[in-house]
Amino acid sequence: MTIQWFPGHMAKARREVTEKLKLVDVIFELVDARIPYSSRNPMIEEIIQHKPRIVLLNKADMADKAVTEEWLRYYRQKGVTALAINSQAGTGLKQIVQESKVLLKDKLDRLKSRGIKPRAIRAMIIGIPNAGKSTLINRLAGKNIAQTGNKPGVTKAQQWIKVGKELELLDTPGILWPKFEDQEVGTKLAITGAIKDTILNLQDLAVYALRFLEKHYPDRLQERYKLSAFPEDIVELFDEIGDLRGCRMPGGFVDYDKVAELVIREIRTEKLGPLSFERPRDLLRDEATDK
């Protein structure tokens, strides 16, 4: 399955982001805590250049806590400030302004030494579709300013939003990239809801997800679908889940499309608990292989 999704407004958004960079002090790079690598646009480094940055691992409540801690350590070792947050509940948001002040301390001190009263910190939020940018903005601002939605591609224009007296945010549309060099990246994005389901083959996604769960979260998979063992043939696994949940077509045959929809929906709604679909050690292993 080849996954690509790059609507026209995303290309425009990239140009606008590049033009607005000179107006901001710091970048808030929003990623999905379940897939911190795959939900990170590889063009970000090129786009933001040398601007100070904070990586925000959003939806941390939906990710495996132990794995998220691994990611935070990974970023620290890279010299990158990173925070685990839950924009829906507001968890970890107070740290964002605090860490911004730390990153910009030298700049703020220079202004003070000249007798200039520092203005509000100006930040740009960048992230892929459905990463939770609008929800984060509304939480920080304390009111519903940014349009939100549980589908990718809701925000399509930039807007400045004041957050108290200390912070001003520039919201931007979610930006994917024109081509996924690694199709596994596209698969993980699709599983977690960053790409519209209407262009996806959900059976392929479910196969990938089930094999991943079998390897990394076998107990949860067995408990959820009452499995006594993991069959080698993925069709048999679909059959067992379909039998348990009554996913049948006329004539009594298992409806594999319904099974796939069920599995993906239950992953996204945390019926199998908080899940992380990639770990820093996988990324480090790939980096070592490339050298």
Image (spheres, rainbow, N blue to C red):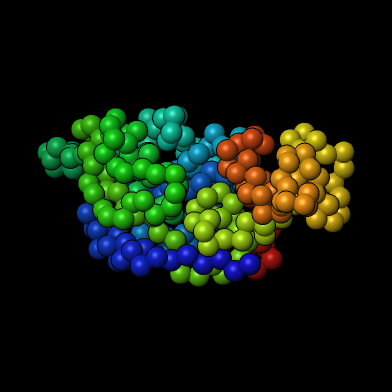
| Front residue (pair 241, 158) | 241
Q: Residue drawn 22% across and 38% down? A: 162
Looking at the picture, tell me which residue is in the foreground, 123 or 199.
199
Where does the image place residue 174, in percent across and percent down from the top left? 39, 55
Q: Is residue 153 left or right of residue 115?
A: right
Please say if 60 is above or below 258: above
Measured as percent of width and height from the top left, residue 7 is found at 40, 65
Quadrant location of the C terminus?
bottom right
At 38% across and 39% down in the image, what residue appears?
135
Q: Nearer the viewer, residue 207 or 261?
A: 261
Residue 137 visible, this orientation: yes
Residue 203 at x, y percent in the picture: 67, 57
The image quadrant of residue 97 is: top left
Q: Residue at x 31, y 44 (%)?
A: 147
What percent of the width, then of the height, locates residue 87? 42, 35
Q: Nearer the viewer, residue 289 or 195?
A: 195
